[in-house]
Amino acid sequence: MIFLRDSASRVGYNRVTGATATTGGALAAYYNEIDPFAASWLRELIAAGHIAPGDVDERSIADVQPTDLVGYDQCHFFAGIGGWSLALRLAGVPDDAPIWTGSCPCQGLSVAGKRGMRTDDWQRLRAGHPEPVTDPRHLWPHLHRLIAERAPPVVFGEQTASADG
């Protein structure tokens, strides 16, 4: 997805959907959420003005390219129903503040995900090995790639700790 901004008319164009939006200002946020139900909620919350205006991209983060994010002030990955956008608003942060957020799923690492990650992947992770983890459920490398290439000034993330650390 690329959001092209025309500074005079403030018209946004979403390359994925072909939609055009005129908001009186730039679309501030990009939301990446693969779950169709959550993505639908994001659109409703945006329309109701509860979270920052923007575009919802339902592609896998593995398919998102750094150039897709040009023109967005905020980027929310694994957006769920917009908790990060709402939290930023409640904290008094303007919708156009250049902030990225991400709450990566951890199925391959967590008890809830049955810790299905292969033993060699676990060993690489614990040793800080640069070789990528092969478990397709491990999505942090995709978010890390986007952060490394776009270099946003602020990134917030969260991950709950397990009982065994």
Image: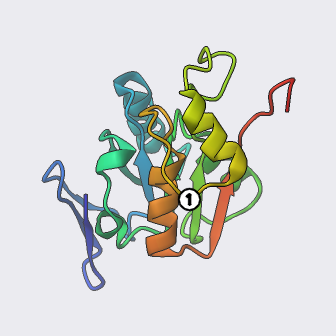
Residue ID at (50%, 54%):
131
Residue 25 position, x and y percent, is: 39, 71
Residue 139 position, x and y percent, is: 48, 42
Is residue 105 shown to the viewer in this render?
A: no
- Foreground residue, 3 or 137? 137
Quadrant (top left, top right, bottom left, bottom right) of the N terminus:
bottom left
Residue ID at (51%, 66%):
147
Q: Secondary structure at mark 1?
A: loop
Residue 23 position, x and y percent, is: 34, 63
- Classify mark 1: residues with Cα within 10 Å, few (<14), some (14-19) or many (20+): few
Farthest residue toward the bottom? 8
Is residue 41 shown to the viewer in this render?
A: yes
Render colour scheme: rainbow
Q: Amino acid at mark 1?
A: Pro
**145 lies left or right of 3:** right
Quadrant (top left, top right, bottom left, bottom right) of the C terminus:
top right
Whether 118 is drawn above or below 52: the answer is above
Mark 1 sits on what residue? Answer: 130
**78 lies left or right of 162:** left
Whether 23 is drawn above or below 151: the answer is above
Residue ID at (57%, 25%):
107
**74 lies left or right of 103:** left
